[in-house]
Image (spheres, coloured by chain):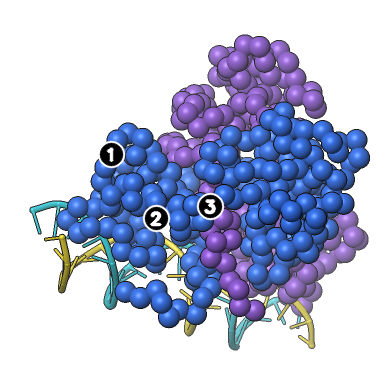
Chain colours: A blue, B purple, C yellow, D cyan
Amino acid sequence: MNEQNKPRPLAEQISELTTNRLSVYLRCLNELDQSGVRTISSKALADQFHLNAAQIRKDLAYFGEFGVRGVGYYVKELKRHLRQILGLDREVRVAIVGAGNLGLALADYPGFRQEGFDIVMLFDSQSQKIGLHSRGGVPIHDIQDFKRLVHREKIGIVVVAVPAASAQGVVNKVVAAGVKAILNFSPGALRVPDDVKLKSVDLTVSMESLSFHLAWGDTTE
Amino acid sequence: MNEQNKPRPLAEQISELTTNRLSVYLRCLNELDQSGVRTISSKALADQFHLNAAQIRKDLAYFGEFGVRGVGYYVKELKRHLRQILGLDREVRVAIVGAGNLGLALADYPGFRQEGFDIVMLFDSQSQKIGLHSRGGVPIHDIQDFKRLVHREKIGIVVVAVPAASAQGVVNKVVAAGVKAILNFSPGALRVPDDVKLKSVDLTVSMESLSFHLAWGDTTE
DNA sequence: TTTTGTGAACTAGTTCACAGCT
DNA sequence: AGCTGTGAACTAGTTCACAAAA
């Protein structure tokens, strides 16, 4: 109905589970669009990609009324809306801190570029790495120049791929530079201010969770 | 159907949120142990690592009564219990499919070895890679030999790090080889039988979720 | 005392089911 | 007719609060 007189922090009202699903829906729509499908109902989308139709409708309803009753959703139109909702309608510039194996692999990861993320630069503290590039050509800069370059290059998201011991220090530096979104691959809990979004991928936790299932039985995700 | 109270699939009754937290608790206990702390109360553990005390006690209560009233938990003892619960009291042998940038980085990721995971081998379909090793010395084998080698080497967990297009095919091969736990890094939904545990790390979803927060994040303080 | 272990209360998230629009 | 959008019902997960134990 209205989206006028809301008290602002939209991102705070939407759960992470919902934003993750929006990303999944967008991927599904990209597939459908490439297959030439023009419209899709929430039921058909749910069946095809093993989702729940009501869930899809509820998730979308947070942002507007994108469907047409009796018809469903126009694929291209919903795609456009989702890209706008997810902030993918403008270039998202990304820097990676940590030019180790993982950082370098992420720098050249094709999946990032695909949906419009631009991996602009890597940072490291080891002087022998500075000035080099990833295989894909992403330059490695000195972490000392972090704040200056992040501003100059208008970096929106920073990926942290450094050893656990240096992670909190790096995150502090990233926060101090004014970055509001961090994807962290280091193990362990990290503290950030409330206005910074930190998302962590903890490989050890993932592996140990699998180990548990291996030890005690079975389930599916 | 019978509903006996003996060794039913325990893993099925424990939520993923709980198993993930158990892994976090173990990491906290390792830190405390290294600092020479002998006992810790759920409250102190919660305060120090920003967790909830009741949550910790509830999570542990699924598996037994490990605490001492009025005292708390003996760090070494709880550590041992958690390692046993998570199946880390025996060697966990891991193979990685996909010797690209990401697969190779994961093969040498120090965090895996740390908690007792043994990255035994890599697999790839590109013939020019077969016979080579990761920097850390993990050998690359032909995916054609997957089933045979997985059995011979008693692989428990398989990590899938291949392009999206080949992911489902690879997962089918992994399932056919009898592997019951898969950590997947490819984007998109994958289907596995109920008795196989699939855990996916979707980097695109993570990045798009951050993009959303960047686009709509709070401005109030 | 202190702190556990746990039912009860609460909160978040999902699914149902249907009114109402096309 | 078909399908969306949404309150209501349900399910899962978290936190509270306290009796019981050391």
Between A160 and A65, the one lying in front of the other is: A65
Question: Are marks 2 and 1 in one subunit?
Answer: yes
* Marks 2 and 3 belong to one chain: yes
Q: CA distance from mark 1 to mark 3?
A: 25 Å
Decide if residue A93 is in sight here. Answer: yes
Give SS at disc 2.
helix
| Residue linked to disc 2 | A81
Tell me residue A45's x, y (percent).
Answer: 31, 47
Whole-percent x, y for residue A81 in the image: 39, 55
Instruction: State the separation of the CA atoms marked 2 and 1.
Output: 17 Å
| Tag 1 secondary structure | loop
Q: Earlier in the sequence, mark 1 or mark 3?
A: 1
Which of labels 2 and 1 is toward the front? Answer: 2
Q: Height in image: A161 above or below B105?
A: below
Amino acid at pointer 3: Arg
Disc 2 versus disc 3: nearer the observer: 3
Question: Which amino acid lies under the numbered mark 1 shown in the image of this protein?
Answer: Val
Label for residue A212?
none
For the point 55% across and 19% down, the residue is B147
In this picture, residue A75 sits left or right of residue B190:
left
Give the alpha-carbon distance from disc 2 to disc 3, as whole Å.
13 Å
Quadrant position of the C terminus of chain B in the picture: bottom right
Q: Looking at this view, is B139 or A154 the one in front?
A: A154
Disc number at residue A37?
A: 1
User: Tags 2 and 3 in contact by the CB under 8 Å rule?
Assistant: no
| Residue topped by disc 3 | A90
Up-down relation of residue A76 to residue B13 (above or below): above
Task: Count the numbered circles shown.
Answer: 3
Query: x, y (%) of residue C10?
Result: 49, 82
Q: Is residue A78 above or below residue A110?
A: below
